[in-house]
Image (spheres, rainbow, N blue to C red):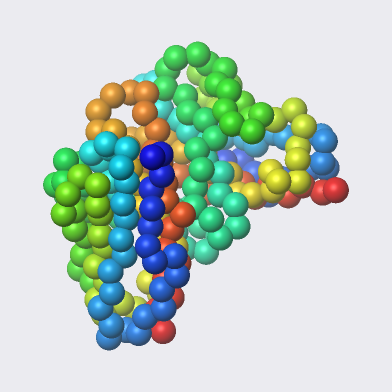
Amino acid sequence: AQSVTQLDSHVSVSEGTPVLLRCNYSSSYSPSLFWYVQHPNKGLQLLLKYTSAATLVKGINGFEAEFKKSETSFHLTKPSAHMSDAAEYFCVVRVGANKLIFGTGTLLAVQP
Amino acid sequence: DTEVTQTPKHLVMGMTNKKSLKCEQHMGHRAMYWYKQKAKKPPELMFVYSYEKLSINESVPSRFSPECPNSSLLNLHLHALQPEDSALYLCASSQVYGTDYGYTFGSGTRLTVV
């Protein structure tokens, strides 16, 4: 069965320092993977998606993620955190044609 | 138009009330979804409509009744809900087929059952 595991429930960084949010996936074939962000009391916004094209995927707001098949990972990174990046981040895998399975989320705090 | 619009944004209802949540998109997406998100939890799939037909029901209680009257609209009819049904209800849409598509989510309806 396909699934994703987010390795950290909380991550805290200082403004201007790099961000790393970790996600491992489980899939018997090449998965479709996504990162979504949810700000407090808001809906979900797509940051980026991997669908078997380039392994390094660039998203919005300076985020990017690298698909590593050998490590079954799809970690989200950003070179320099901004206060506005504080939010909940979800790693998501698509199962079949239309079903999304969400990871448990990582809450990113950005300290001034 | 690249948005999914959900109304109302907030809803408080009693356990004997009947209410409906509405979702609308004009991106030409033929798959539409309802997700339920409890506080500090990830969203969980409830229903999927594909070409206006119900294709997935994740064993949701019958007090939740989805409806897809046309390709742009998705409703969720609520009746005799319980306090534990209080949550953020998210609507999403996407293409039906292909490998390179994403999902667009609405901002959600925050439902409180009293």
Pinpoint residue B70: horizontal percent, then vertical percent: 17, 49
The answer to which quarter of the image holds residue A68 is top right
- Residue A40 appears in the figure: yes
Quarter of the picture holding the N terminus of chain B: top left
Percent coordinates x, y for residue B50 in the rendering? 19, 41
Does any portion of residue B58 appear in the rendered image? no
> Is A65 situated above or below A36?
above
Q: Is residue B33 left or right of residue A67?
A: left
Measured along the vertical axis of the image, is residue B70 above or below residue A6? below
| A104 to B11, vertically: above or below | above
Q: Nearer the viewer, residue A21 or B93?
A: B93
Q: What residue is shown at x 28% (from left), y 24% (from top)?
A: B98
Question: Residue lying furthest right in this view?
Answer: A112
- Image quadrant for the C terminus of chain B? bottom left
Q: Position of residue B47 (x, y in %)?
A: 26, 52
Say which residue appears at 36% left-offset and 28% top-offset: B101
Left or right placement of residue B69 versus residue B72 in this view = left
